Amino acid sequence: MESGNILFSIIIMALIIIPFVWMYLARNNNKKNLQKTFSTFAGPKGFSSGNIELYNQKGLAIDTNQKLVCFTPDVQTPEAYDCLSFEQIKECKVRTLKKSVTTASGSSEIIDKIQLLFVLSQGGEKVFDLFSLEKDFQVSDQLSKSEKWSKQINSSVGFSA
């Protein structure tokens, strides 16, 4: 009877632990695929996969050696990658677009989009959409990650706020 309880406990623990291990391995595999895709896309431009971060199938990377910032709205679509050199960037800001929604208790504002807005040195702007309510459904830590990336890009480019 005792061995039956032990076996049952081991099976239950395995059923609980295996999904977390599987998610961890899948996330690491996604990051490796992203690095490989970034390397094949940006390799001709001299990009060596340095600091890379995933945002719900979006990827953002910075290479301080080659002075490049690369972004993709979809890791699975290599032709959608976009790179900016540090020379093109005057400043990087986080832009949060909100929309008003009506609820039973009145109206409130929710975050609709989080973007990295690049002010270009030749004039104009370039926008990388890091979060969109239509595609991502829920904001988790994208705002804090966006702030972190903005500071890192600005310090790499030489802009101080």
Image: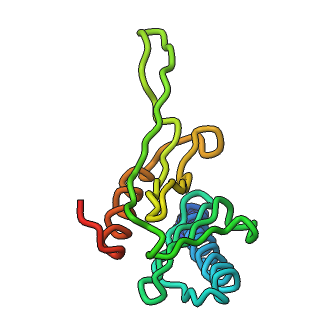
In this view, the residue farthest toward the left is: 161
Q: What residue do we see at 54% from left, 89% from top?
A: 48
Could you say which is closer to the camera, residue 159 or residue 42? 159
Quadrant in the picture for residue 145? bottom left
Seen from the viewer's position, the closer of residues 28 and 3 is 28
- Coloring basis for residues: rainbow
Screen quadrant of the C terminus: bottom left
Seen at 63% across and 75% down, the residue is 34
Q: Viewer-proximal residue, 30 or 143? A: 143
Q: Residue at x 51, y 19 (%)?
A: 101
- Residue 125 can be seen in this image: yes
Q: Is residue 102 left or right of residue 152?
A: right
Q: Foreground: 36 or 128?
A: 128
Residue 11 figure quarter: bottom right
The percent position of residue 62, horizontal first and vertical second, equals 47, 76
Q: Is residue 124 above or below residue 41?
A: above
- Residue 144 horizontal/vertical position (percent): 36, 54
The number of discs equals: 0
- On the image, the x and y values in percent for residue 160 come to 24, 65
Q: Residue at x 43, y 41 (%)?
A: 96
Above or below, 83 relative to 67: above
- For the question of whether residue 14 can be seen, the reply is no
Q: Is residue 161 left or right of residue 25?
A: left
Can you give x and y, in whole percent of width and height, for residue 139 in the image? 48, 44
Image quarter (top left, top right, bottom left or bottom right) of the N terminus: bottom right
Q: Is residue 9 above or below residue 33?
A: above
Is residue 15 rendered to the left or right of residue 106? right
